[in-house]
Image (tube, rainbow, N blue to C red):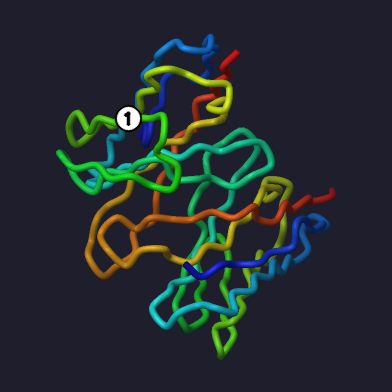
């Protein structure tokens, strides 16, 4: 099973360029998430989607937009990239079962550098 | 949101048990304690979680203090593959999305 697949794995952008990070999961999960991880730090939630058609802001949403294209896919867009957005971006997904914790499954990340 | 405190780093020898501590003195009654780990150049992976009772699974054991202000992740026989950053996380949201708030975790080094 592929699990959570992120593309691309690496990308270098110039300041001001735009880019969309792609994420797809094949586990039929309802919830999907985007995190960023800066060097030496833990992950911070950017946006999440509890179900197809819904999205909500996390801790650090400024400078990003998201689209939950369908149940499988959740994309993250940088409209005008800034050097402060240089980071490793992780996508995750989980089942949704109210009242019960469902572990999140993570992709291997997209390493994004903005010059 | 309740916070967790973990040592920045720990070392262990291969095939020996490892006890990774986590303090969470402001934990609320409904907070679950979760552990994830992140291997080098990979995304985090779920390890274990619990509420009040000790928990065991194929990867590890979780020992929770009676007052729930601290917990310990136990790896019974460390292997080189267990070298990773281990995150102790309290569930941030009781709703449907299971949002997680990661701290900086404990970097575990395993010596052969």
Label 1 CA crowd tier, 10 Å (few <14, some 14–19, many 20+): some
Residue at 59%, 74% (x, y): give it: B24
- Looking at the figure, which quarter contains the N terminus of chain A? top left
Q: What residue is pinned by disc 1?
A: A65
Residue at 52%, 80% (x, y): give it: B54
Residue at 55%, 30% (x, y): give it: A88
Q: Nearer the viewer, residue A104 or B78?
A: A104
Q: Residue furthest left?
A: A53
Q: Nearer the viewer, residue A13 or A109?
A: A13
- In this rendering, the answer to whether A5 lies above or below B64 is above
Q: Is residue B35 left or right of residue A8?
A: right
List x then y, in percent, for residue B107.
72, 51
- In this rendering, the answer to whether B21 lies above or below B107 is below
List x then y, in percent, for residue B110.
79, 51
Q: Is residue B22 left or right of residue B27?
A: right
Q: Secondary structure at mark 1?
A: strand
Specify the subunit that label 1 lies on: A
Q: Is residue B16 left or right of residue A16?
A: right
List x then y, in percent, for residue A66.
30, 31
List x then y, in percent, for residue B44.
53, 45
Q: Nearer the viewer, residue A17 or A110?
A: A17
Q: How many marks?
A: 1
Residue at 56%, 80% (x, y): give it: B64
- Looking at the figure, which quarter contains the C terminus of chain A? top right
- In this rendering, the answer to whether B52 lies above or below B96 is below
Q: Nearer the viewer, residue B94 or B19?
A: B94
Occupied quadrant, residue A103: bottom left
Q: Is residue B42 left or right of residue A52?
A: right
């Amino acid at each position: 099973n592929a699990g959570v697949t992120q593309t691309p794995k690496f990308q270098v952008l110039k300041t001001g360029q735009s880019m969309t990070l792609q994420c797809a999961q094949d586990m039929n999960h309802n919830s999907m998430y985007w995190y960023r991880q800066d060097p030496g730090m833990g992950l911070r939630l950017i946006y999440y989607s509890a179900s197809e058609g819904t999205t909500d802001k996390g801790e650090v949403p400024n400078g990003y937009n998201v689209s939950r294209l369908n149940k499988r896919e959740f994309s993250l867009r940088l409209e005008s990239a800034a050097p402060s957005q240089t980071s490793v971006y992780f996508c995750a997904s989980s089942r949704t079962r109210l009242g019960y914790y469902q572990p999140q499954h993570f992709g291997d990340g997209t390493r994004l550098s903005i010059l | 949101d309740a916070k967790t405190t973990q040592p920045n780093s720990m070392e262990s020898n291969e095939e020996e048990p490892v006890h990774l501590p986590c303090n969470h003195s402001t934990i609320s009654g409904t907070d679950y304690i979760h552990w994830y780990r992140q291997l080098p150049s990979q995304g985090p992976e779920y390890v274990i979680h619990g509420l009040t009772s000790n928990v065991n699974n194929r990867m590890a054991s979780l020992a929770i203090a009676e007052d729930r202000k601290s917990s310990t992740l136990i790896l019974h026989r460390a292997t080189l593959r267990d070298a990773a950053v281990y995150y102790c996380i309290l569930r941030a949201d009781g709703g449907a999305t299971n949002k997680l708030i990661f701290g900086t975790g404990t970097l575990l080094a395993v010596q052969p």
